[in-house]
Image (spheres, rainbow, N blue to C red):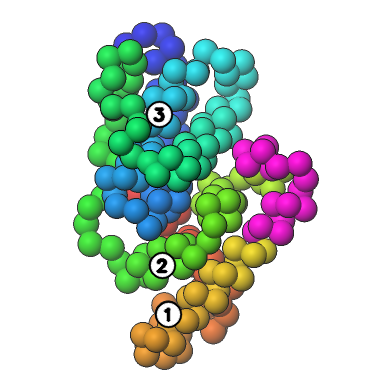
Amino acid sequence: MSRNTAEFTELLKPHYNDAVKYSRALCATWSADDAEDVLQQSFLLALENFHNLKDTTKFRSWFFKIITTTFYTAIRKHFWKKFLPIDDSRYNAPDMPEVFDRAEQTESRIVLNKALSVLSAKERSAILLYEIAGFSIEEIVTIQKENSLSAVKSRLSRARKKLKKQITQQEHFSGRGDDPYGDLNGDLENETLNLIAEIRSER
């Protein structure tokens, strides 16, 4: 393993789980294999451009920006077969563990995935960066290449409203009645955040 690859791997380790959760939630409407392709492509692009990262203390935001950009590119290209193969010999990519759990999803995960599917790509990435990855609004401005805080704040507000509306509709049509996910006092804001927190807490 080259010095750059070894250093990259060490910097990645503390952020790996969050990167997996972020990629999986971004690609909620796609298959696990497709979502894994987005993350693996992000690994390759990050490793290829690692020498350009001058300040390694900014590795986390730099890497999540690459994941976000890769996701946008995947949508624009409509998409998967144009990706570089994972075993491309030009890259000495580090071995990574199995990325996505193929086990049956929990009911609340299915609800959240359906809710995420109504968000635009930028709305989805903004709320996941904020809620799952823990980035500040200022950092999301940079990651999403926006010009103002208000653009991201508005995007987060729209995303929350859409999530709550979609979850409410799913509750209505499922006939589950009140409080289907535990003692959340009927507060859809808390419900949305608790559903998102489920992803954050998984290991």
**Span colored in magenta:** 141-156
By secondary structure, the bulk of the magenta-drawn segment is best described as helix
Q: Quadrant of residue 56?
A: top right
In the picture provided, is 16 more to the left or to the right than 99?
Answer: right
Mark 3 to mark 1 CA distance (whole Å): 35 Å
Residue to which mark 3 is pinned: 43
Tags 3 and 2 in contact by the CB under 8 Å rule?
Answer: no
- Disc on the earlier residue, 2 or 1: 2
- Amino acid at pointer 3: Phe
Dot 2 crowding, Cα within 10 Å, few <14, some 14–19, many 20+: some
Which badge, 3 or 2, is on the more N-terminal residue?
A: 3
The residue that label 1 is drawn on is 170
Residue drawn at point x = 39 percent, y = 70 percent: 111
> Vertically, is 171 above or below 134?
below
Q: Answer left or right for 79 relative to 149.
A: left
Name the residue that disc number 2 marks: 114
